[in-house]
Image (spheres, rainbow, N blue to C red):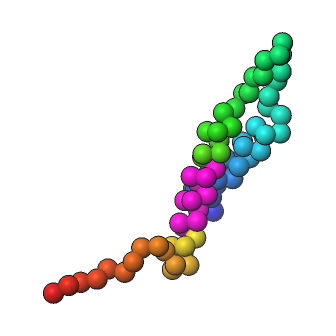
């Protein structure tokens, strides 16, 4: 398992925990212990990294081949 895959799993778990009730309401105010937007941003980032690794491993990367001009 790569670093990106492991980090993606951690980010997804943190995001799910944040959505599942890490929010407390007190006196009409709501307090969240995690910044859900930042966690979602991390999930998207690491998902893109895992997708890049998978494409590279499969030989289907998005880079075009090197062309030499003489």
Residue sticking out furthest to the front: 28
Please state the horizontal and vertical placement of residue 9, each as a whole percent of the image: 69, 53
Region in magenta: 43-53
Decide which of 6, 35 is in the foreground and name it.
Answer: 35
> Vertically, is 32 above or below 45?
above
Residue located farthest toward the left when viewing the structure as drawn: 70
Instruction: Out of 19 and 6, give the one closest to the viewer.
Output: 19
The image quarter containing residue 33 is top right
Where residue 37 sits, quadrant-wise, is top right
Q: What is the quadrant of the C terminus in the image?
A: bottom left
Q: Is 46 placed left or right of 62 in the picture?
A: right
Quadrant holding the N terminus: bottom right
Residue 30 sits in which quadrant?
Answer: top right
Count all numbered tags in the image, as a single digit: 0
Is the stretch drawn in magenta largely helix, strand or loop? helix
Q: Position of residue 60 (x, y in %)?
A: 52, 78
Q: On the picture, is 41 further left or further right than 13? A: left
From the top left corner, tell me how far across and down residue 21 is, in percent. Answer: 83, 34
Magenta stretch holds residue 38: no
Name, please, the residue furthest toward the top.
27
Residue 62: percent from the left, percent from the top?
A: 47, 73
Instruction: Please tell me whether residue 58 is drawn above or below residue 24 in the rendered image.
Output: below
| Magenta-span inclusion, residue 50 | yes
At 71% from the left and 49% from the top, the residue drawn is: 12
Q: Nearer the viewer, residue 63 or 7?
A: 63
Would you say residue 56 is visible in this rendering? yes
Q: Relative to 69, is 20 above or below?
A: above
* 58 shown above or below 20: below
């Amino acid at each position: 398992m790569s670093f990106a895959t492991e980090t993606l799993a951690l980010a997804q778990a943190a995001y799910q925990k944040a959505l599942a009730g890490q929010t407390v309401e007190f006196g009409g105010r709501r307090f969240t212990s995690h910044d859900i937007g930042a966690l979602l941003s991390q999930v998207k980032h690491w998902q893109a990294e895992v997708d890049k690794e998978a494409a590279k491993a499969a030989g289907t990367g998005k880079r075009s081949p090197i062309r030499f001009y003489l």
